[in-house]
Image: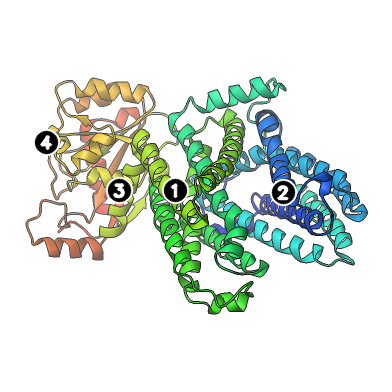
Amino acid sequence: MKPKNNNQFVLLRERRFLPFFITQFLGAFNDNFFKIALVLMLTYQTTRPLGMESRDFNAFCGALFILPFFLFSAVAGQLADKFDKARMMRAIKLFEISIMALGALGFILHSAAPLVTALFLMGLHSTLFGPVKYSFLPQHLNEEEIVGGNGLVEMGTNVAILLGEIAGGLLIADRQHGHWLVAAGTLAVAAGGYAAARRVPPSPPADPLLRVNFNPITATWRSLRFARGNRTVFLSLLGISWFWFYGLVFLSLFPDLTKGVLRGGESVVVVLLTVFSIGVGVGSLLCERLSGHKVEMGLVPFGSIGLTLFGADFHLACRGFAPLGEAMTTVDFLRSTGTARLLADLAAIGLFGGLYIVPLYAVIQTRSERTHTSRVIAANNILNALFMVGSAAFSIGLFKLGLDIPQVLLATALVNAGVAVFIYTLVPEYFVRFLIWLLVHSLYHLRTRGTEHLPESGGALLIASHVTHIDALLIAAASHRPIRFVVNEVELRGPFPGLLLRRMGAIAKRRHWRKGVERLLRAGHLVCVFATPDPAPDGGMPLRVEGLDALLSNCRRPVLAVTLRGAWGTLFSRERSPALLRIYRGLTRTLELAVSPPLTRQAASAARVGEELKRMYGDGAAPAAS
């Protein structure tokens, strides 16, 4: 892998990412290009397709497309772990070309049977491609690039969906040549996807000796059971699936909302879809900047708060909307009273949705076992499909209770708040990371140096200088992995930062604290011990931690020194200047957190680590303690 990039868009110039990006972009475009053209042609240009009413036929098509996710996701995950993902992509794209050939025949003949068969096969195509798509990224991107790469993929997917729906709708509306244009277009896009897939670099199989279980029932059960083995990953899967539930309620109701509440024509539906898709794209791209090039779980609660607040306000905006007339054009809609608030809410829902979902994908990619990543993604697809079905049942149930469309949207936003509280109660790390993220981004400018030395897996011992009462929170903000801190009992008992430290699993520095640290290191945790018992301005003070030499002499894990410069005199240090002055210092200074390379076992003594801390404290570029 290459070194990290400071700009995620640099990835679009590199072969390890660009061909894959084009391949997945064209696949998402073709899915929606084909689906919207099929539904519109058989709804508006055919009488009772397959003997069904239009509404029933549309529901049937939706179920048919989702069905392969239930049946074949687990098998698809196994295949993606067993075989080279680049070869898998090329095979899947060849399969797409054959599907589009069948679909082209259906469009030319105006025949429903080949079209719905092709729709089912396109669902199978998406089922096979999903595990390959998301397990490809951690193989080719550095840890610092994974959030940016996921952001680009989510942005590209939403833009592709939007463009596919617009292209399919516009072309099939041409009654004379539309079916020929759609037939040729879907084949051309599929061929373009295969051409891009041929440029995707090799992606060695994660588990080449895996024996594939082709029984969909037992394979599905095993995938879900394995995903449950990692609590954080499994709840992240549920979080992603919930977003699909939430998003599908909104997207599926846009046509009826536009017609019955907003009094707009078909073009207004396109406006709503466009604003929502742009919002998701912008939110996805913002993740890299807001997370500081690392997997930041704290953005997930931020996203869920936005989904609830702006989802609820969207309901109020619908109530306050004053249309200029019936079946309005786009121009009439934009001139109507309340349009600006409506579109702003919709864009914000999309933006916070992007902030919510991109870190979740990054969590499952970085915290799943490398040999099972594709199967975890397959479990995600299964759960997504279940939640999508649940979304439809949820909407139908609320309508039967007498709720109207804006009320259903409000109920969805409120339920989102309950789901968020439930998940963050089960996994406090999400909300703790959110509070740390808010603290660091509101009161400090934090720059990191040497964080690449933190191991991606396995145990390691961090010895840190202690400058402020919130050193643990600032250090935690610089690592995507959880860190267990050893702190004084007094710090642990207090409301702040004691409550957060307790939620982070901090260890009280009691008589036998060293044994607890040794157990955590053997279990593969990052553990941080502070160099001095109390916060002090001199980060190079001699270590005065009882038992530290004994801990270091027995340590079989990497030992790293950590310093924090520029924090003395800011709000949470023990410097006695007025609070407003200390807040001002925190806002105007750039704090620097530096991590040393792992020390050799021979050099890992308390005195040697103390010297390393003092050297690092004096070498940094951040303002010295004052």
Query: Of the residues shown, which amino acid type is indicated by label 1?
Result: Lys
Q: Quadrant of residue 258?
A: bottom right
Going from the N terminus, do you reach mark 4 or mark 3 first?
3
Decide: marks 2, 3 in contact (CB < 8 A)?
A: no
Decide: marks 1, 2 in contact (CB < 8 A)?
A: no
Residue extending farthest to the left is: 576
Residue, x 93% and y 53% (percent of image)? 109
Residue 87's x, y, as percent? 75, 38
Where 253 falls versus 60 (above or below)?
Answer: below
Going from the N terminus, do you reach mark 4 or mark 2 first?
2
**CA–CA distance between discs 4 and 1?**
32 Å
In the image, which disc is placed on residue 490?
Answer: 4
Query: Of the residues shown, which amino acid type is indicated by label 4?
Result: Val
* Residue sitting nearer the eye, 615 or 258: 258
Asked which secondary structure carries label 1, the reply is: loop
Marks 2 and 3: which is nearer the front?
Answer: 2
* Residue sitting nearer the eye, 554 or 338: 338
Residue, disc 2: 58
Residue, disc 3: 436
Q: Residues within 10 Å of mark 3 (few under 14, many from 20)?
A: many
Quarter holding the N terminus is top right
Query: Of the residues shown, which amino acid type is indicated by label 3?
Result: Ile
Q: Quadrant of residue 51?
A: top right
